[in-house]
Amino acid sequence: VSQSRYVKRHRNIDIYASYDADWNTVPTIAGSSGHPLNVVLAARARGGANGAVGVYGDIRTFGGNLTIGGGDVTASDYAIANSQAGVLINGMLDASGNGSGSSDSNLPTATTGGNISIRGKGTSADLGPYNWGVKVQYGAVVTGGAGNIDIVGYGGNGSGAWAVGSVGVLLESYAYVKSNTGNITIKGYAGTG
């Protein structure tokens, strides 16, 4: 986490940074059975121009809500790319009530689950072939029950060899987004380039 604040409230964890908020593989953020944990990961917490969120490990809320974005400490706005993506998911985001989310094609069986909201934007600067709003690669976004998943991404200014340099939402290489009975909404808006 770059220039960060870490706030733990009763059954809540808020991690926010003035710039980038990167969560690496150790340790895992997790609630426990019967004790859901609400998690907020926010970049640009003071409203700065750029600040991305990267998740490279596991977050298991056991039915708590998970919010990833930027703009303020509640992540009510977008995380904005410095390189690659506004939000980069390369791990497990699991809001199922029993923490059983998996990175495979099996549908979740948990009867309860929290909501997941992810908001990311590319930047107006030309980052070459990587300027995505939200990228999920070798990762999963999973909830159970009637938990909803909402992913919104705006591509930035991309150029170079890849034709996907300014994609709003990129699901690539073993990416899974799934819920039991909840709604999944994915909105991607192309950038320039």
Image (spheres, rainbow, N blue to C red):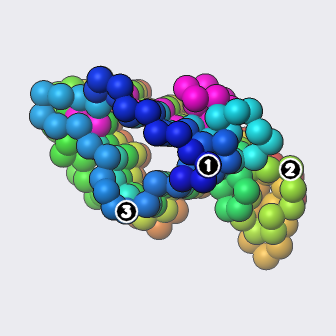
* Element type where label 2 sits in the image: loop
Q: Is residue 99 magenta?
A: no
For the residue pair 89 and 39, the one nearer the viewer reads as 39
Kind of residue sitting beneath label 3: Thr
Q: Quadrant of residue 129?
A: bottom right
Identify the secondary structure beneath mark 3.
Answer: loop
**Residue 78 seen in the current view:** no
Residue drawn 64% across the image and 29% down it: 72
Q: Position of residue 13 (x, y in %)?
A: 38, 34
Q: CA distance from mark 1 to mark 2?
A: 23 Å
Q: Which residue is mark 2?
A: 124
Identify the residue under disc 1: 3
Please give the name of the residue rendered at 86% of the width and 50% of the height, measured from the top-left corner.
Answer: 124
Three-letter amino acid code at the position of disc 1: Gln
Q: Nearer the viewer, mark 3 or mark 1?
A: 1
- From this viewpoint, is residue 156 visible? yes
Nearest the eye: 127 or 5? 5
- Judge whether 29 appears above or below 109 on screen: below
Magenta segment boundaries in residue numbering: 61-77
Please give the residue where the numbered disc 3 appears in the rendered image.
25
